[in-house]
Image (tube, grey):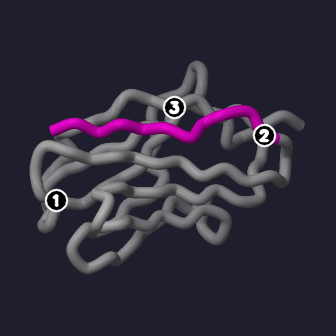
């Protein structure tokens, strides 16, 4: 299984970015796909997740209403649309996959998101 994250970059406060996570190596029905982030000097934290088969989503309070997670079954890709970005959103963002009800056991490489004030 491979997860390839992309789409990070530098954005101003209030701007938008869309991250992509291209998944390969298996079918992901029955899996949950998640986005996590880690800021310098801080622990990795949960951002959002989506149930691949039914599309249900869940967000961290800090991003609720600003970020949207979605998936494209045909492209085997998960997206994280990030709007109204804040400097505190600056972090390395990681995508992850795990069977529903289990821990995330597949991780992609990170993509850097930097939000300037």
Q: What residue lies at 40% left-to-right and 72% top-to-bottom?
A: 57
Callout 3: 10 Å neighbours few (<14), some, many (20+)? many
Q: Earlier in the sequence, mark 3 or mark 2?
A: 2
Secondary element under disc 2, as helix, strand or loop, is strand
**Residue 28 — which label?**
1
| Number of disc labels | 3
Q: Is residue 99 placed above or below 50 in the rendered structure?
A: above
Q: What residue lies at 64% left-to-right and 71% top-to-bottom?
A: 65
Q: Earlier in the sequence, mark 1 or mark 3?
A: 1
Q: Earlier in the sequence, mark 2 or mark 1?
A: 2
Residue 101 placement (x, y as % from top left)? 14, 62
Query: How much space separates mark 3 and mark 2, taking CA atoms?
Result: 14 Å
Secondary element under disc 3, as helix, strand or loop, is strand
Callout 2: 10 Å neighbours few (<14), some, many (20+)? some
Q: Is residue 94 placed above or below 98 in the rendered structure?
A: above
| Relative side of 16 to 29, left or right | right
Q: Quadrant of residue 84?
A: bottom right
Q: Is residue 68 placed above or below 98 in the rendered structure?
A: below
**Residue 111 — which label?**
3
Residue 89 placement (x, y as % from top left)? 67, 42
Q: Which residues are magenta?
A: 1-11
**Residue 11 — which label?**
2
């Amino acid at each position: 299984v491979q997860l390839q994250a992309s789409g990070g970059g530098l954005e101003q406060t209030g701007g938008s970015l869309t991250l992509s996570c291209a998944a390969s190596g298996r079918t992901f029905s029955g899996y949950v796909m998640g986005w996590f982030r880690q800021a310098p000097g801080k622990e990795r934290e949960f951002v959002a997740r989506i149930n691949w088969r039914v599309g249900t989503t869940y967000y961290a309070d800090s991003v609720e209403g600003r970020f949207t997670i979605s998936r494209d079954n045909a492209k085997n890709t998960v997206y994280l649309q990030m709007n109204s970005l804040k400097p505190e959103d600056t972090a390395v963002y990681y995508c992850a996959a795990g069977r529903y009800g289990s821990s995330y056991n597949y991780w992609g490489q990170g993509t850097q998101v930097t939000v300037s004030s």
